[in-house]
Image (tube, rainbow, N blue to C red):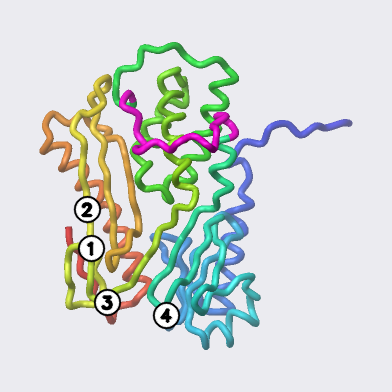
Amino acid sequence: MDFMLGKVLPGQRNGSQMWHEAFSGFLGSELQINDFPAYPSLLRSTNGECLMLLQHVDDVLCLSTQKYLDDVLLPALNPREIMAKENDELTFLKRKHTLISEGEMAIQSHPKHLEPLFDLLCINRRLKPKKTPGHPMLDEPDTTAKLNAGDATVYRSCIGILLYMSSDYVDCQYTIRGLSQSMASPSVQAMACLRHLAQYLLGCTDHAMVLKYEAHKGLLHHNPCDYTLEIYSDSDWAKHKQTRRSVSSGYLFLFGCLLYPTSRSQKALALSSAEAEIYASASATSDAILMYHCLRFAIGDKDEIKVSS
């Protein structure tokens, strides 16, 4: 009998789950590095000398003391890249991490992610970049024609690239969220907004996020304790003129460094700006609760974590 392999949809195979369980089991039994039940991708050694983040099956980011690295990790795991002194670099999830100084690190998305976007949209690299990521028509009623099949495929491919990069380009998250809502049936107006965003990104090819540690100092708060987790939220009440739905934005900062940004459409239809702000703050606070417990797991019970909003 002859057999032919057809399409294999995501989720039909559990290889990633089996690998994660096997690897985390090895870490627990051999190195006493155990995962956090609420967030299994985060792991910590028994005495706190090492933290690990497991992502995308085989990508592992590790933070450890020099002694633990030399005595335990190097013999057991043989890490591929090590960042220990100034100007050292490592790559994780296609992002370059550069240690600028002892308390300062830069994270940069690989420029190659933007090149396919420009190629798909036939963007001339010599064009002057747009000043803002959002097109004026982004939140206006859309009465334009639907794209043909070929252009619709291009649109969806571009949105896929942008969704992967959205955490690196925080200023573009609102626009990317809005454009992703048109993936099912993209229109001429949506394509114009997409091209506007791509031209804005022409000026962001060297973009990097710098995280700088300053003890007891938050973005707007000074904390006598060791850790300050700050929560910021906002909403644009009923800005979209067709759906009248609001958008929540939330930002979590630690030591004044951005940990997690979000831009989400609110599921409930807010009838006032106060209601929209409540939904936004509730969303950001939910994220902060998980982040708080992740931080508590990472640092142990000795240090205090103050949450400010």
Q: Is residue 180 magenta?
A: no
Mark 1 — residue? 219
Where residue 215 is drawn, which disc sits there? 3
- The first of marks 4 and 2 along the sequence is 4
Count up the numbered dots.
Answer: 4
Q: Point out residue 16 in the picture as x, y percentages from the top left corner.
A: 60, 53
Q: Point out residue 303 in the picture as x, y percentages from the top left corner.
A: 27, 79
What is the distance, in whole Å, between disc 4 and disc 1 at their CAs? 27 Å
Is there CB contact under 8 Å for labels 3 and 2? no
Is there CB contact under 8 Å for labels 1 and 2? yes
What is the distance, in whole Å, between disc 4 and disc 3 at their CAs? 20 Å
Packing grade of label 1 (10 A; few <14, some 14-19, many >=20) is some
* Direction from residue 237 to residue 145 in the image, left or right: right
Q: Name the secondary structure under disc 3.
A: loop
Packing grade of label 2 (10 A; few <14, some 14-19, many >=20) is some
Of tags 4 and 1, the one toward the viewer is 1
What's drawn in magenta, residue-wise? Answer: 119-137
Where residue 48 is drawn, which disc sits there? 4
Q: Point out residue 172 in the picture as x, y percentages from the top left corner.
A: 38, 41
What is the distance, in whole Å, between disc 3 and disc 1 at their CAs? 12 Å
Amino acid type assigned to the residue bearing label 1 in the image: Leu
* Image quarter of the N terminus: top right
